[in-house]
Image (cartoon, rainbow, N blue to C red):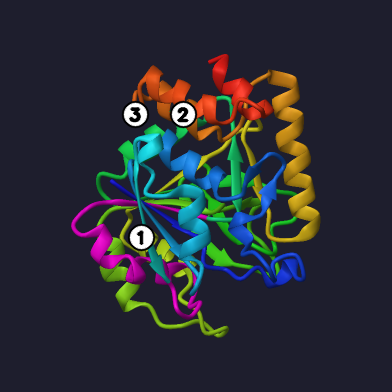
Amino acid sequence: MKGIILAAGRGSRLYPMTRPVCKPLLPVYDKPMIYYPLAVLMQAGIRDIMIIIPPSEEGPFYRLLGNGSKWGVNISYEVQEVPRGIADAFLVAEHFIGNDSVCLVLGDNIFHSPNIEQIMSNAGKINQKGATVFGYYVEDPRAFGVVEFDENGNALSIEEKPRFPKSNYIIPGIYFYDNQVIEIAHSLKPSARGELEITDVNIEYLKRNELHVIKLDEKFTWLDAGTADNLLEAARAVKTVQDETGRYIACLEEIAFKRNYISEEDLNSLADKLKQTLYGQYLMCL
């Protein structure tokens, strides 16, 4: 399975803070935003990763992440010249996906759960055929893609930003697809706002009776860091969890070490370079 992070948004809702730096490189508490979706892919066992970025931004991304080898993964980059919607990611990355299945994560979404590694690994195994997405309960779902369930928990319908939602379950920004997604993405027509909608991809899988929806429990936290208030809320949430548990969220070095992507010697080398920081001291204690 391949992994894609869609990090091509300019972050206009965050102006002026995103004028000098693109949104996925902004800090969320103690780490760059891009660390969080990258951590999710690594926790799902995915090591071949493409990051879709805005024009002229490869330098800053590469200085931060490089080719991923320090974490035992392979990171490549592709530019999305013009934002054309989430589903356009599959067209931009078509050559990268090849004949594989794929997991797409939005670059400004933050996920956390005590069981996140198991949840993501299981989701990746389910979609040998079809698609696997998640249902997340929110009080007001009108700004999101909403999934309706029958009495047995099977998906009945999906609507994008409905005025009158049929449920309180929305589909957050992580999606697992088999290779049919490329053909489906090619068949999409732009929506009224001129974008290729990820909701239309999910609806097509639903029509084919190949959409699996996993309901997330109350222990799972999802945050969209796309506005200033949400960015602050996300930072506070990360700090709270780390203070309460003593464990870092989205610590790429720790994930890589625990999954045997890097050796103890590699971990110590990375920690030594950061030994003057709390982050480095955390790594030294692993």
Q: Which residues are magenta?
A: 80-106
Q: Nearer the viewer, residue 22 or 115?
A: 22
Labelled pair 3, 2 in contact (Cβ < 8 Å): yes
Q: Secondary structure at mark 3?
A: loop
Residue for badge 1: 205
Q: Residues within 10 Å of mark 3 (few under 14, many from 20)?
A: some
Q: Quadrant of residue 23?
A: bottom right
- Looking at the picture, tell me which residue is in the foreground, 115 or 165: 115
Q: What residue sits right under mark 2 in the picture?
A: 255
Going from N to C along the chain, the mark reached first, 1 or 3, is: 1
User: Is residue 77 positioned above or below 116 on the image?
Assistant: below
Residue 75 in magenta?
no
- Measured as percent of width and height from the top left, residue 245 is found at 69, 19
Q: CA distance from mark 3 to mark 2?
A: 8 Å
Q: Distance of mark 1 from mark 2, alpha carbons?
A: 32 Å
Residue drawn at x 66%, y 27% is 276
Residue drawn at point x = 78 percent, y = 39 percent: 236
Q: Relative to residue 228, is residue 50 drawn left or right? A: left
Marks 1 and 3, how far apart in space? Answer: 33 Å
**Eye-nearest disc, 1 or 3:** 3
Mark carried by residue 261: 3
Q: Position of residue 48 (x, y in %)?
A: 31, 47
Circle 1 SS class: helix
**Circle 2: residue type:** Ile
